[in-house]
Amino acid sequence: MRILVYFTLLSVGLSAFFWGIFVAQGFLAPLVVAILLMMVVLPISKWFEKKGIQRGWASFLSTLSILLFFVIISGIVGLQVKKFSGDWPEIKERLKPNIEQAQNFVEENTGMKMQIPQFLEDSEGESDKKENTNEEGDPEANEEDSSENGSDSAPKSGAPEQEAGSSSGEQGGGSMLQTAGGYAMSFFGFLGTFLLTFIYVFFFLLYRKKFKTSILKMAADHNRDETREIISESLNIAQHYLLGRLLLILFLAIIYTIGLTISGVEQAILISVLAAALSLMPFIGNMVGYGLAVIMAFVSGSGMTGVLGVTITFAIAQFIESYILEPYVVGEKVNINPVFTIIVVVLGGAVWGIMGMLVAIPVLGIIKVVFDHIPVLEPIGYLLGEENKGDDDEDEEGFFKKIKIWVSDKFSKGGS
Protein backbone atom coordinates (compact mmCIF):
# COMPACT_ATOMS: atom_id res chain seq x y z
CA MET A 1 0.00 0.00 0.00
CA ARG A 2 2.82 2.37 0.89
CA ILE A 3 4.53 1.72 -2.47
CA LEU A 4 1.30 2.58 -4.28
CA VAL A 5 1.02 5.86 -2.35
CA TYR A 6 4.66 6.77 -3.12
CA PHE A 7 4.18 5.90 -6.79
CA THR A 8 1.02 8.03 -6.98
CA LEU A 9 2.71 11.01 -5.31
CA LEU A 10 5.73 10.67 -7.61
CA SER A 11 3.52 10.51 -10.70
CA VAL A 12 1.48 13.55 -9.65
CA GLY A 13 4.63 15.48 -8.76
CA LEU A 14 6.37 14.72 -12.06
CA SER A 15 3.22 15.54 -14.04
CA ALA A 16 2.87 18.89 -12.26
CA PHE A 17 6.59 19.60 -12.75
CA PHE A 18 6.62 18.94 -16.51
CA TRP A 19 3.32 20.74 -17.00
CA GLY A 20 4.81 23.74 -15.17
CA ILE A 21 7.96 23.92 -17.29
CA PHE A 22 5.83 23.44 -20.42
CA VAL A 23 3.63 26.40 -19.50
CA ALA A 24 6.65 28.52 -18.50
CA GLN A 25 8.59 27.75 -21.69
CA GLY A 26 8.63 31.38 -22.82
CA PHE A 27 10.42 32.35 -19.59
CA LEU A 28 12.51 29.29 -18.79
CA ALA A 29 13.79 28.31 -22.26
CA PRO A 30 15.87 31.46 -22.95
CA LEU A 31 17.08 31.40 -19.35
CA VAL A 32 18.34 27.79 -19.56
CA VAL A 33 19.92 28.35 -23.00
CA ALA A 34 21.61 31.51 -21.70
CA ILE A 35 23.09 29.65 -18.71
CA LEU A 36 24.51 26.94 -20.99
CA LEU A 37 25.89 29.48 -23.48
CA MET A 38 27.45 31.44 -20.60
CA MET A 39 29.28 28.31 -19.54
CA VAL A 40 30.54 27.87 -23.10
CA VAL A 41 31.88 31.42 -23.55
CA LEU A 42 33.23 31.71 -19.99
CA PRO A 43 36.79 30.71 -21.07
CA ILE A 44 36.69 33.43 -23.75
CA SER A 45 35.66 36.03 -21.19
CA LYS A 46 38.41 34.92 -18.80
CA TRP A 47 40.94 35.15 -21.66
CA PHE A 48 39.91 38.75 -22.38
CA GLU A 49 40.22 39.59 -18.69
CA LYS A 50 43.74 38.12 -18.57
CA LYS A 51 44.65 40.49 -21.41
CA GLY A 52 43.78 43.43 -19.16
CA ILE A 53 40.26 44.11 -20.44
CA GLN A 54 37.69 45.05 -17.80
CA ARG A 55 35.06 42.45 -16.95
CA GLY A 56 32.21 44.49 -18.45
CA TRP A 57 33.92 44.84 -21.83
CA ALA A 58 35.15 41.23 -21.69
CA SER A 59 31.59 40.03 -21.09
CA PHE A 60 30.30 42.22 -23.93
CA LEU A 61 32.96 41.01 -26.41
CA SER A 62 32.38 37.37 -25.46
CA THR A 63 28.62 37.73 -25.92
CA LEU A 64 29.14 39.58 -29.20
CA SER A 65 31.45 36.85 -30.51
CA ILE A 66 28.93 34.05 -29.99
CA LEU A 67 26.12 36.27 -31.32
CA LEU A 68 28.08 36.88 -34.53
CA PHE A 69 28.74 33.15 -34.80
CA PHE A 70 25.03 32.34 -34.75
CA VAL A 71 24.23 35.18 -37.16
CA ILE A 72 26.82 33.91 -39.68
CA ILE A 73 25.53 30.33 -39.44
CA SER A 74 21.94 31.55 -39.85
CA GLY A 75 22.96 33.61 -42.90
CA ILE A 76 24.64 30.64 -44.58
CA VAL A 77 21.64 28.40 -43.95
CA GLY A 78 19.28 31.15 -45.11
CA LEU A 79 21.11 31.53 -48.42
CA GLN A 80 20.98 27.79 -49.00
CA VAL A 81 17.26 27.68 -48.18
CA LYS A 82 16.64 30.55 -50.61
CA LYS A 83 18.52 28.69 -53.32
CA PHE A 84 16.56 25.52 -52.57
CA SER A 85 13.23 27.37 -52.76
CA GLY A 86 14.26 28.76 -56.15
CA ASP A 87 15.02 25.27 -57.42
CA TRP A 88 11.87 23.76 -55.89
CA PRO A 89 9.64 23.97 -59.03
CA GLU A 90 12.25 22.06 -61.02
CA ILE A 91 12.68 19.50 -58.22
CA LYS A 92 8.91 19.05 -58.02
CA GLU A 93 8.74 18.32 -61.76
CA ARG A 94 11.41 15.64 -61.34
CA LEU A 95 9.48 14.05 -58.48
CA LYS A 96 6.21 13.75 -60.40
CA PRO A 97 7.18 10.65 -62.48
CA ASN A 98 8.49 8.88 -59.37
CA ILE A 99 5.30 9.71 -57.45
CA GLU A 100 3.16 8.44 -60.32
CA GLN A 101 5.16 5.19 -60.50
CA ALA A 102 4.75 4.73 -56.74
CA GLN A 103 1.01 5.38 -57.07
CA ASN A 104 0.65 2.80 -59.82
CA PHE A 105 2.72 0.24 -57.90
CA VAL A 106 0.66 0.64 -54.72
CA GLU A 107 -2.64 0.56 -56.60
CA GLU A 108 -1.70 -2.56 -58.61
CA ASN A 109 -0.42 -4.53 -55.61
CA THR A 110 -2.78 -3.42 -52.87
CA GLY A 111 -5.79 -1.99 -54.66
CA MET A 112 -5.48 1.16 -52.55
CA LYS A 113 -5.01 4.61 -54.05
CA MET A 114 -2.04 6.53 -52.70
CA GLN A 115 -2.65 10.21 -52.10
CA ILE A 116 -0.14 12.75 -53.41
CA PRO A 117 1.42 14.89 -50.64
CA GLN A 118 -0.07 18.35 -50.50
CA PHE A 119 3.24 20.15 -51.03
CA LEU A 120 3.68 18.27 -54.35
CA GLU A 121 0.28 19.17 -55.73
CA ASP A 122 0.32 21.50 -58.72
CA SER A 123 -1.36 24.73 -57.79
CA GLU A 124 -1.29 25.85 -61.40
CA GLY A 125 -3.36 22.81 -62.41
CA GLU A 126 -5.97 23.70 -59.82
CA SER A 127 -6.16 27.28 -61.08
CA ASP A 128 -6.51 26.00 -64.66
CA LYS A 129 -9.42 23.81 -63.54
CA LYS A 130 -11.11 26.81 -61.98
CA GLU A 131 -10.63 28.83 -65.16
CA ASN A 132 -12.07 25.99 -67.23
CA THR A 133 -15.14 25.73 -65.05
CA ASN A 134 -15.65 29.48 -65.28
CA GLU A 135 -15.35 29.36 -69.08
CA GLU A 136 -17.97 26.57 -69.34
CA GLY A 137 -20.78 29.08 -68.71
CA ASP A 138 -22.19 30.85 -71.79
CA PRO A 139 -21.69 34.62 -71.44
CA GLU A 140 -24.02 35.33 -74.38
CA ALA A 141 -26.89 33.56 -72.65
CA ASN A 142 -26.27 35.66 -69.57
CA GLU A 143 -26.30 38.80 -71.67
CA GLU A 144 -29.63 37.76 -73.28
CA ASP A 145 -31.17 37.10 -69.89
CA SER A 146 -30.04 40.47 -68.63
CA SER A 147 -31.39 42.23 -71.76
CA GLU A 148 -34.77 40.50 -71.34
CA ASN A 149 -35.03 41.69 -67.78
CA GLY A 150 -34.77 45.26 -68.97
CA SER A 151 -32.81 48.26 -67.98
CA ASP A 152 -34.74 48.82 -64.75
CA SER A 153 -33.76 45.47 -63.28
CA ALA A 154 -30.08 45.87 -64.15
CA PRO A 155 -29.16 48.21 -61.32
CA LYS A 156 -31.16 46.10 -58.85
CA SER A 157 -29.32 42.92 -59.80
CA GLY A 158 -26.00 44.70 -60.05
CA ALA A 159 -26.17 46.16 -56.54
CA PRO A 160 -26.06 42.82 -54.71
CA GLU A 161 -23.21 41.68 -56.96
CA GLN A 162 -21.21 44.78 -56.08
CA GLU A 163 -21.94 44.28 -52.41
CA ALA A 164 -20.89 40.61 -52.61
CA GLY A 165 -17.75 41.53 -54.49
CA SER A 166 -16.82 44.23 -51.99
CA SER A 167 -17.51 41.92 -49.04
CA SER A 168 -15.42 39.12 -50.54
CA GLY A 169 -12.65 41.60 -51.26
CA GLU A 170 -12.77 42.85 -47.68
CA GLN A 171 -12.66 39.26 -46.39
CA GLY A 172 -9.70 38.44 -48.63
CA GLY A 173 -7.87 41.57 -47.57
CA GLY A 174 -8.65 40.87 -43.92
CA SER A 175 -7.33 37.31 -44.11
CA MET A 176 -4.15 38.51 -45.81
CA LEU A 177 -3.65 41.14 -43.13
CA GLN A 178 -4.22 38.54 -40.40
CA THR A 179 -1.71 36.17 -42.01
CA ALA A 180 0.86 38.94 -42.42
CA GLY A 181 0.25 40.06 -38.85
CA GLY A 182 0.70 36.50 -37.59
CA TYR A 183 4.02 36.14 -39.39
CA ALA A 184 5.17 39.52 -38.13
CA MET A 185 4.27 38.67 -34.54
CA SER A 186 6.06 35.32 -34.79
CA PHE A 187 9.17 36.95 -36.25
CA PHE A 188 9.35 39.72 -33.66
CA GLY A 189 8.62 37.22 -30.89
CA PHE A 190 11.52 35.02 -32.04
CA LEU A 191 13.79 38.06 -32.43
CA GLY A 192 12.90 39.27 -28.95
CA THR A 193 13.61 35.86 -27.40
CA PHE A 194 16.87 35.60 -29.37
CA LEU A 195 18.12 38.99 -28.16
CA LEU A 196 16.88 38.38 -24.60
CA THR A 197 18.94 35.19 -24.46
CA PHE A 198 22.15 37.07 -25.24
CA ILE A 199 21.27 39.83 -22.78
CA TYR A 200 21.03 37.09 -20.15
CA VAL A 201 24.41 35.74 -21.28
CA PHE A 202 26.02 39.18 -20.87
CA PHE A 203 24.70 39.71 -17.33
CA PHE A 204 25.50 36.15 -16.25
CA LEU A 205 29.09 36.70 -17.34
CA LEU A 206 29.25 40.11 -15.70
CA TYR A 207 27.86 39.02 -12.32
CA ARG A 208 29.09 35.41 -12.31
CA LYS A 209 31.14 35.89 -9.13
CA LYS A 210 28.10 37.17 -7.26
CA PHE A 211 25.98 34.22 -8.40
CA LYS A 212 28.68 31.74 -7.37
CA THR A 213 29.14 33.38 -3.96
CA SER A 214 25.40 33.33 -3.30
CA ILE A 215 25.24 29.60 -4.12
CA LEU A 216 28.15 28.90 -1.78
CA LYS A 217 26.46 30.87 1.00
CA MET A 218 23.37 28.67 0.68
CA ALA A 219 25.47 25.60 1.47
CA ALA A 220 26.55 24.66 4.98
CA ASP A 221 30.11 25.45 6.01
CA HIS A 222 31.21 21.80 5.90
CA ASN A 223 29.69 21.35 2.41
CA ARG A 224 31.18 24.38 0.66
CA ASP A 225 34.15 22.53 -0.78
CA GLU A 226 31.84 19.92 -2.22
CA THR A 227 29.58 22.68 -3.59
CA ARG A 228 32.59 24.26 -5.32
CA GLU A 229 33.37 20.88 -6.86
CA ILE A 230 29.78 20.54 -8.13
CA ILE A 231 29.94 24.00 -9.73
CA SER A 232 33.33 23.23 -11.30
CA GLU A 233 32.21 19.88 -12.72
CA SER A 234 28.98 21.38 -14.05
CA LEU A 235 30.98 24.07 -15.88
CA ASN A 236 33.31 21.43 -17.32
CA ILE A 237 30.39 19.36 -18.59
CA ALA A 238 28.70 22.28 -20.32
CA GLN A 239 31.94 23.59 -21.81
CA HIS A 240 33.22 20.24 -23.06
CA TYR A 241 29.90 19.00 -24.35
CA LEU A 242 28.45 22.11 -26.01
CA LEU A 243 31.69 23.55 -27.39
CA GLY A 244 32.80 20.09 -28.46
CA ARG A 245 29.45 19.46 -30.15
CA LEU A 246 29.70 22.72 -32.08
CA LEU A 247 33.15 21.74 -33.37
CA LEU A 248 31.87 18.26 -34.12
CA ILE A 249 28.98 19.69 -36.16
CA LEU A 250 31.48 21.75 -38.14
CA PHE A 251 33.65 18.71 -38.88
CA LEU A 252 30.65 16.59 -39.83
CA ALA A 253 29.27 19.31 -42.10
CA ILE A 254 32.58 19.44 -43.97
CA ILE A 255 32.76 15.63 -44.32
CA TYR A 256 29.13 15.40 -45.45
CA THR A 257 29.55 18.24 -47.95
CA ILE A 258 32.58 16.61 -49.58
CA GLY A 259 30.93 13.19 -49.75
CA LEU A 260 27.53 14.39 -51.00
CA THR A 261 29.13 16.65 -53.61
CA ILE A 262 31.16 13.73 -54.97
CA SER A 263 27.98 11.62 -54.96
CA GLY A 264 26.24 14.19 -57.17
CA VAL A 265 23.63 15.26 -54.60
CA GLU A 266 22.15 18.70 -55.20
CA GLN A 267 21.98 21.23 -52.35
CA ALA A 268 24.85 19.34 -50.70
CA ILE A 269 25.72 22.21 -48.33
CA LEU A 270 22.16 22.59 -47.01
CA ILE A 271 21.65 18.84 -46.53
CA SER A 272 25.08 18.51 -44.88
CA VAL A 273 24.45 21.35 -42.42
CA LEU A 274 21.03 19.93 -41.51
CA ALA A 275 22.39 16.39 -41.09
CA ALA A 276 25.28 17.66 -38.95
CA ALA A 277 22.96 19.77 -36.78
CA LEU A 278 20.61 16.82 -36.33
CA SER A 279 23.49 14.87 -34.78
CA LEU A 280 22.71 16.81 -31.59
CA MET A 281 19.81 14.40 -31.22
CA PRO A 282 21.52 11.02 -30.65
CA PHE A 283 20.49 8.08 -32.84
CA ILE A 284 17.32 9.79 -34.11
CA GLY A 285 19.12 12.74 -35.71
CA ASN A 286 21.57 10.55 -37.61
CA MET A 287 18.78 8.47 -39.13
CA VAL A 288 16.77 11.55 -40.14
CA GLY A 289 19.84 13.19 -41.70
CA TYR A 290 20.65 10.04 -43.66
CA GLY A 291 17.04 9.81 -44.86
CA LEU A 292 17.12 13.43 -46.10
CA ALA A 293 20.36 12.79 -47.98
CA VAL A 294 18.98 9.62 -49.62
CA ILE A 295 15.80 11.43 -50.71
CA MET A 296 17.87 14.27 -52.16
CA ALA A 297 20.04 11.76 -54.03
CA PHE A 298 16.92 10.36 -55.75
CA VAL A 299 15.64 13.88 -56.48
CA SER A 300 19.00 14.85 -57.98
CA GLY A 301 18.77 11.96 -60.41
CA SER A 302 21.85 10.21 -59.03
CA GLY A 303 19.96 6.94 -58.65
CA MET A 304 21.42 4.01 -56.76
CA THR A 305 24.95 5.28 -57.39
CA GLY A 306 24.15 8.44 -55.44
CA VAL A 307 22.47 6.44 -52.68
CA LEU A 308 25.54 4.22 -52.40
CA GLY A 309 27.76 7.32 -52.20
CA VAL A 310 25.53 8.80 -49.49
CA THR A 311 25.62 5.54 -47.53
CA ILE A 312 29.42 5.33 -47.72
CA THR A 313 29.74 9.01 -46.74
CA PHE A 314 27.54 8.61 -43.65
CA ALA A 315 29.23 5.35 -42.66
CA ILE A 316 32.68 6.94 -42.81
CA ALA A 317 31.46 10.06 -41.01
CA GLN A 318 29.87 8.03 -38.22
CA PHE A 319 33.03 5.98 -37.76
CA ILE A 320 35.19 9.12 -37.60
CA GLU A 321 32.71 10.78 -35.23
CA SER A 322 32.41 7.86 -32.82
CA TYR A 323 36.00 6.64 -32.67
CA ILE A 324 38.21 9.62 -33.54
CA LEU A 325 36.48 12.99 -33.15
CA GLU A 326 34.12 12.44 -30.23
CA PRO A 327 36.70 11.05 -27.74
CA TYR A 328 39.04 13.99 -28.39
CA VAL A 329 36.69 16.86 -29.27
CA VAL A 330 33.73 16.18 -26.98
CA GLY A 331 35.43 13.92 -24.47
CA GLU A 332 33.71 11.58 -22.05
CA LYS A 333 32.48 14.18 -19.59
CA VAL A 334 28.79 13.48 -20.16
CA ASN A 335 28.61 9.81 -19.21
CA ILE A 336 24.88 9.31 -19.65
CA ASN A 337 23.33 5.90 -20.17
CA PRO A 338 22.16 5.56 -23.82
CA VAL A 339 18.68 4.53 -22.63
CA PHE A 340 18.26 7.73 -20.63
CA THR A 341 19.85 9.72 -23.44
CA ILE A 342 17.04 8.69 -25.79
CA ILE A 343 14.38 9.17 -23.08
CA VAL A 344 15.54 12.67 -22.15
CA VAL A 345 15.84 13.78 -25.80
CA VAL A 346 12.30 12.57 -26.58
CA LEU A 347 11.00 14.14 -23.36
CA GLY A 348 12.75 17.43 -24.13
CA GLY A 349 11.16 17.44 -27.58
CA ALA A 350 7.71 16.79 -26.10
CA VAL A 351 8.07 19.64 -23.59
CA TRP A 352 10.06 22.35 -25.42
CA GLY A 353 10.29 21.11 -29.01
CA ILE A 354 13.62 21.33 -30.83
CA MET A 355 15.11 23.58 -28.17
CA GLY A 356 14.31 20.97 -25.55
CA MET A 357 16.09 18.29 -27.58
CA LEU A 358 19.21 20.46 -27.82
CA VAL A 359 19.53 21.32 -24.13
CA ALA A 360 18.31 17.97 -22.74
CA ILE A 361 21.66 16.12 -22.63
CA PRO A 362 23.84 18.85 -21.01
CA VAL A 363 21.08 19.60 -18.47
CA LEU A 364 20.83 15.90 -17.60
CA GLY A 365 24.63 15.76 -17.30
CA ILE A 366 24.59 18.62 -14.79
CA ILE A 367 21.73 16.97 -12.87
CA LYS A 368 23.78 13.75 -12.72
CA VAL A 369 26.74 15.65 -11.24
CA VAL A 370 24.50 17.09 -8.52
CA PHE A 371 22.98 13.67 -7.78
CA ASP A 372 26.43 12.05 -7.54
CA HIS A 373 27.40 14.46 -4.75
CA ILE A 374 24.23 14.04 -2.68
CA PRO A 375 24.23 10.73 -0.73
CA VAL A 376 20.44 10.29 -0.85
CA LEU A 377 20.31 10.82 -4.64
CA GLU A 378 23.54 9.00 -5.48
CA PRO A 379 21.74 5.78 -6.58
CA ILE A 380 19.79 7.79 -9.16
CA GLY A 381 23.02 9.39 -10.41
CA TYR A 382 24.51 5.91 -10.74
CA LEU A 383 21.44 4.76 -12.68
CA LEU A 384 21.74 7.71 -15.11
CA GLY A 385 25.43 7.00 -15.82
CA GLU A 386 27.04 4.60 -18.25
CA GLU A 387 27.81 1.03 -17.24
CA ASN A 388 31.19 0.76 -15.54
CA LYS A 389 33.70 -1.96 -16.11
CA GLY A 390 33.18 -4.60 -13.49
CA ASP A 391 29.45 -4.00 -13.13
CA ASP A 392 28.97 -7.42 -14.71
CA ASP A 393 30.85 -10.60 -14.02
CA GLU A 394 32.07 -10.74 -17.60
CA ASP A 395 34.92 -8.42 -18.51
CA GLU A 396 34.65 -9.06 -22.20
CA GLU A 397 34.08 -5.97 -24.34
CA GLY A 398 32.24 -5.68 -27.60
CA PHE A 399 33.88 -5.62 -30.98
CA PHE A 400 33.27 -1.90 -31.54
CA LYS A 401 34.52 -1.05 -28.07
CA LYS A 402 37.79 -2.82 -28.86
CA ILE A 403 38.10 -0.87 -32.10
CA LYS A 404 37.52 2.38 -30.23
CA ILE A 405 40.23 1.56 -27.67
CA TRP A 406 42.64 0.47 -30.41
CA VAL A 407 42.11 3.71 -32.39
CA SER A 408 42.44 5.81 -29.23
CA ASP A 409 45.73 4.10 -28.32
CA LYS A 410 47.11 4.64 -31.82
CA PHE A 411 46.23 8.34 -31.82
CA SER A 412 47.52 8.89 -28.29
CA LYS A 413 50.85 7.30 -29.21
CA GLY A 414 51.02 9.34 -32.37
CA GLY A 415 50.25 12.54 -30.49
CA SER A 416 52.90 11.83 -27.86
Image (cartoon, rainbow, N blue to C red):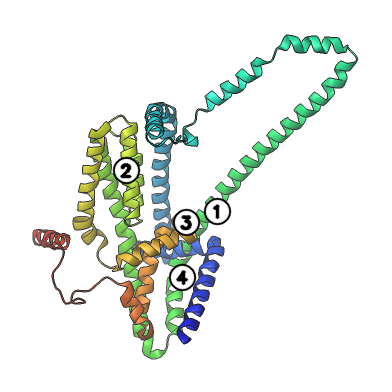
Disc 3 residue type?
Gly
Dot 2 corresponds to which residue?
A: 272
Q: Quadrant of residue 102?
A: top left
The crowding category of the residue bearing disc 4, from other C-alpha atoms within 10 Å (few below 14, some 14 to 19, many at least 20), is few
The residue that disc 3 covers is 353
Could one spot residue 413 in this view of the protein? yes
Q: Residue at x 48, y 86 (%)?
A: 1
For the residue pair 382 and 113, the one nearer the viewer reads as 113
> Reading the chain from its start, which is encountered first: label 3 or label 2?
2
Where residue 379 appears, as percent x and y from the top left, is 33, 81
Q: What residue sits right under mark 1 in the picture?
A: 192
The span from disc 4 to disc 2 (Cα, nearest Å) is: 39 Å
Circle 3 crowding by C-alpha within 10 Å: few under 14, some 14–19, many from 20 = some
Q: Is residue 356 above or below residue 114?
A: below
Q: Which quadrant of the figure has residue 178?
A: top right
Relative vertical location of residue 16 with respect to residue 293 in this rendering, above or below: below
Alpha carbons under labels 2 and 1: distance apart: 29 Å
